[in-house]
Amino acid sequence: MEDGQIIDLYWQRSEEAIVQSERKYGAYCRAIACAILTAREDAEECLSDTWLAAWRAMPPQRPAVLRTFLGRLTRNLSLNRQLYNAAQKRGGGEVTIALEELKECAGSESAEGMLEAAELGRVIDVFLRTLPEMECSIFLRRYWYLDSIDAIAGQFGLRAGAVKTRLSRTRGKLKKYLWKEGYAL
Amino acid sequence: MKRIDETQLLQAMGEVGDDLLLRAERPGTARSRRPWRGALAACLCLALVLTAVLYLPNSFRMGSSGNTAAEPGAAQNESAGHPNYEQGQPEAGQEGSDYETAVDAVPEHEGAEKGETGREHPEHGMQDGAACLAELGIGDASALAAAACGGRSVPAADLYQALASAAVMDADRDGAPLQLTEQVTLTLASGTVLEGRGDPAAGVLQLGGYHFYHSDFSVLLKGA
């Protein structure tokens, strides 16, 4: 079924929309959740929450790309669950490692005042578009999809060390870029 | 100046554009960043082909003085559009042809696949000369009782020496343009008569489906 038809089903408040979403993008969203969450049950819960969140978001939203829309929902839900788990000292996984790695380009202290995540996201989006395609994709595989270093190495036909080096360079560039954009590190 | 922590950074990463996310799902395109591997493979293949094309044809001619003599004739032959090489190998079914006579004298060769005999070198259609001679019934010098070229007697021992040390090509696979003008008759000690044709200029003797290349043939097979 085409994405437009699935979105129409959401707008028509048809439960068939969730069935079709799960059929078409269930594996994709499950992969995102499983990369972030160490516990299988947590991933399945986040997947169920994804369909519920999509049900609540459409209408009024009509996403241009349903795939990334659902993936984004899954990622946000899974990240929140993982951060909660980490806070509760229950689990770690790739999120904890990724956060450790990102410490070098973000201050360890809490932000003063509320920061618009959307604005910071826009800044990062602009930065990523300045990168060569491969560097950008590797960075997103690591910090959006939360893929492991070994998995990324396999996907791109590189050695793990080469992936680490590229990520390190990109983090350095991001650090400088954020500084120029007014984000204290 | 706003201060951010790594958690906010990771969460903000979720706001990047759909197109970047979709592109990151196609790592196959990123693999093309290592084109040197393909280029290296292509260069190696090219080197192998050039080696085969430039080196091997020379090795067939053994690099002798007869080679240089053969080339002008070959060029002349090709320009005339009637390669004598083809004339020297009459088509199957032509009764009484020299080619068939020579083959008939060696019945064990009939119908045999050249590549299945074990004589052939694994590359280029080169043959093991000693095995070819044995197949023709000329296992040693004593097996060759007499030889003649165009009615002129040829020293059998000298001819055998040339045959034994010749480079041998399967006639069917040898694309060299030859002028096999000289009639050669070999009489074996067993009484068998082998007939072949020679190209003195190229230093080639065609015998029993093989081309024997040796510079001595330039002298031995020269017409009276």
Image (cartoon, coloured by chain):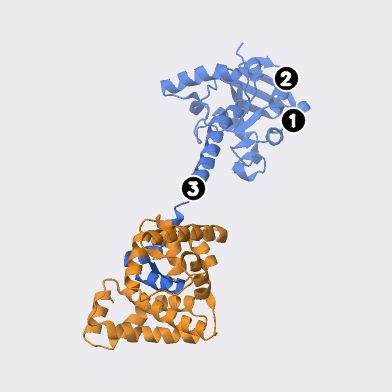
Which chain wears blue?
B
Label number found at residue A4: none
State the CA–CA distance, disc 2 to disc 3. 53 Å
Residue in the picture at 24% in, 88% down = A13
Q: Which residue is mark 2?
A: B158
Picture coordinates of residue B109, whole percent (x, y): 63, 39
Name above or below for residue B153 compared with residue A122.
Answer: above
The three-letter amino acid code for the residue at tag 3 is Gly
Mark 1 vs mark 2: in front = 2
Would you identify the image quadrant in which residue A9 lies? bottom left
Mark 2 or mark 3: which comes first in sequence? 3
Q: Quadrant of the N terminus of chain B?
A: bottom left
The three-letter amino acid code for the residue at tag 2 is Asp
Picture coordinates of residue A42, whole percent (x, y): 47, 85
State the CA–CA distance, disc 1 to disc 3. 60 Å
Q: Which residue is mark 3?
A: B38
Q: How many residues crowd around disc 3 within 10 Å: few (fewer than 14), some, or many (20 or more)?
A: few
Query: Which chain does tag 3 point to?
Result: B
The three-letter amino acid code for the residue at tag 1 is Ser
Same-subunit check for callouts 1 and 3: yes
Query: Which chain does tag 2 point to?
Result: B
